[in-house]
Amino acid sequence: MEKTIKINGMMCPHCERHVKEALEAIDGVETATPSHTANNAVLTLSADVPDKTLKAAVEAAGYQWAE
């Protein structure tokens, strides 16, 4: 299953790496491909992961969850 989430605050590839590591640490997230230019991340999920779990990981990494 693929899911796209919006993220604010990423400015460079270094930021993308932080978000990628935070999201891929979640059970059920197989891959995360963040883009600082598109302000989003495309996730490949192996299980249903609640948005609140994804949001917590993004915010813990220092970025803003965008609705």
Image: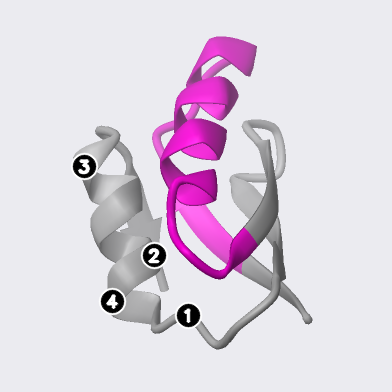
- Please identify the quarter of the rendering in which residue 8 is found: top left
| Residue beneath disc 2 | 54
- Which residue is tagged 3? 60
Residue type at mark 3? Ala
N-terminal-most mark, 3 or 2: 2
Q: Do the residues labelled 3 and 1 touch (CB within 8 Å)?
A: no
Q: Which of marks 3 and 4 is nearer the N terminus?
A: 4
Q: Look at the picture and state if 45 lies above or below 25.
A: below
Residue hosting label 1: 49
Q: Give the Cα separation between the discs numbered 3 and 1.
A: 17 Å
Asked if the residue at tag 2 contacts the one at tag 4, i.e. Cβ–Cβ closer than 8 Å, the answer is yes
Amino acid beneath label 1 = Val
Question: Answer yes or no: do the residues labelled 3 and 2 have beta carbons within 8 Å?
Answer: no
Decide: marks 2, 1 in contact (CB < 8 A)?
yes
Q: Which amino acid does label 2 sit on?
A: Leu
The mark that comes first in sequence, 3 or 1, is 1
Q: What element carries label 1?
A: loop
Residue 11, compared with residue 24, is above or below; it is above
> What percent of the width, then of the height, locates residue 54?
39, 65
Give me the C-alpha separation between circle 4 and circle 2.
Answer: 5 Å
For marks 3 and 1, give the one nearer the viewer: 1
Q: How far apart are marks 3 and 4 (CA)?
A: 12 Å
Indicate whether 40 appears above or below 12.
Answer: below
Q: Give the crowd class for mark 3: few <14, some 14-19, many >=20 residues within 10 Å.
A: few
Foreground tag (4 vs 1): 1
Which of these two is toward me, 35 or 19? 19
Per the image, the residue denoted by label 4 is: 52
Question: How far, Cα to Cα, is label 4 from label 1?
Answer: 8 Å
Given this view, does label 2 or label 1 mark the residue nearer the observer?
Answer: 1
- Which residues are the magenta region? 5-29
Q: How far apart are marks 3 and 2 (CA)?
A: 10 Å
Q: In which quarter of the image is residue 66?
A: bottom left
